[in-house]
Structures are given as C-alpha cells and as structure tokens.
Amino acid sequence: MSDRKVISFENIKIACKSCSLVTLCLPMGLDPEDMDRLDRIIKRSRPLHRGDHLFREGDAFQCLYIVKTGSVKTYAPSEDGGEQVLGFHLPGELIGLDAIENASHNCSAKVLETSAICEIPFSHLEELSISMPSLQHQMYRLLSREISQDESMLTLLGKNNAEERLAAFLLSLSGRFKRRGFSPYDFYLSMSRHEIGNYLGLAVETVSRLFTRFQEEGLLEVERKHIQLLDLQRLESVVKRSSSDTNQIQST
C-alpha cells in the first residue's frame, strides 16, 4: 500500500477545463465560457483524510460535493445502532443530491482515503443553471444516473445470491475505473471487507470466503486490498449464471 499516489495540493487547484474528469463530471457538455463561470463558484479545499466527514446526517444542505481524487462512502444509521453503507463514490461522482428535497442531509459522507473534494454551493449553482440550459441538462442527467444506480442496487440485493453480488460489485468497480482512465483489471479497494459486506448485505466472513473462492477458481488475485481481475469474461458469467438460475427457478 506504500505505493499509493500522494496527492499534491497544487493538483487540487486545477480548473475544471483542465481536469481529467471533465467528461465525467458536472462541467460535461459546457462550452469554455460557461465552464469558466462554473469554475468560479467551485471551492477546492485542502486534502481530506480517511475518517474526515464531508457532512453528517441532519446537517443543513449547503453544497454538492464532487470527488476529485480518492474515494468517499455514504452511510446511514442502521437499526442495530451501527451503520448501513449506501454507496462508494469515486473521482468524478457527485455527492449530496439526496439533500435537495428537504434541505438537509439524510445520510453521512465519510472519506475512505486521502482525497480531494470540489465543493459547489447549491444556491450559486441554481443561479447559474437559470442562465445556462446546458448546466441544467447536466444536473438532470446526474440525477437520472443516481436513480438508475439505486435501482440497479435494489435489483442486485433482491436476487439473494452472494456470488452474484460480489462479482457484480467488482465488475462495477472495474467499469468505473476504466471510464476514469485507470486500469479495469488492477486496482486497490479503499473500503474494508466489512464495508463491502455491509453494502452488499453479506456477512464479512462470506465476503472473505468468496474472495478466496474466486482466487482459487482463477478469476482474480487478491492481496489485502490489492485486486487483480484475471478473467473478466468468467466473472461476468458468474452474474449471468446466477441470473439464469433464478429465471429457471421462477419458471418452474
């Protein structure tokens, strides 16, 4: 883990139009002039570290947050007094959209590793979107993407198959890393086994056992948080096989 990249404060201050995430983030589709207008309202703070919070449940809604580097998890209190992980957020992803309706956050957001975050005051963003239809359209697109991801997660959890859940989770991370220009085969998990299990509705022992099984079957190699996906096609077949088995059961 000692080879993880060190975040430079100078890199954090890169303007939107020069950022490598511009095709994934809120500025996508904006012309250079509009991008400059958006860039002027964005706040770029010092790097945050593991355990720092962007916001906590019940905090007044003021800003939307975009992960620039690193990763963040969102979570809510669970019935047993612990926490229920709601999502893991990678560079280019927007956090805080759920707070727009009630003007307060329904969950908490905690940094998983040293991260750089862009903050966008929502009142300023609303003002800009009135005169920038392309920005308003991008907001709708991001809201739609969040709804789609929530629906996909509910579908995944409803299938009640541990193998499928973990395989789908790893494939999702692979695709998300690829869209950001990183390797889809070789990456580090910033979240713990316990957090993965919490998110997928699985016991931590089940998650560890499945990682071991996938490794024995030649699907991946795992060393602590370092993951190498060796056979994406066979990993995809785990998800498809589980779905096929479910359909066969439902048709009998």
Image (cartoon, rainbow, N blue to C red):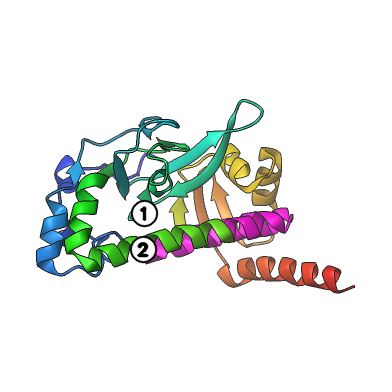
Q: Is residue 2 visible?
A: yes
Q: Quadrant of residue 49?
A: top left
Which stretch appears magenta?
152-179
Q: Is residue 121 visible?
A: no
Amino acid beneath label 1: Glu
Which residue does the numbered mark 1 point to in the structure image? 93
Q: Quadrant of residue 72?
A: top left
The vertical placement of 237 against 209, above or below, is below
Residue at 78%, 67% (x, y): give it. 246
Q: Give the camera-side residue of 230 and 106.
A: 106
Q: Mark 2 or 1 closer to N-term? A: 1
Residue 62 picture location, percent across and down = 29, 38
The vertical placement of 169 against 111, above or below, is below
Report, in whole angstroms, how far the alpha carbon at label 2 lies from the one at label 1: 14 Å
Residue at 40%, 65% (x, y): give it. 178
Left or right, residue 213 beside residue 6: right
> Is 163 contained in the magenta span?
yes
Question: What secondary structure is the stretch in magenta mostly built from?
Answer: helix
Q: Quadrant of residue 132?
A: bottom left
Residue at 21%, 60% (x, y): give it. 130
Report helix, strand or loop for mark 1. Answer: loop
Left or right, residue 131 beside residue 49: left
Amino acid beneath label 2: Tyr
Which residue does the numbered mark 2 point to in the structure image? 140
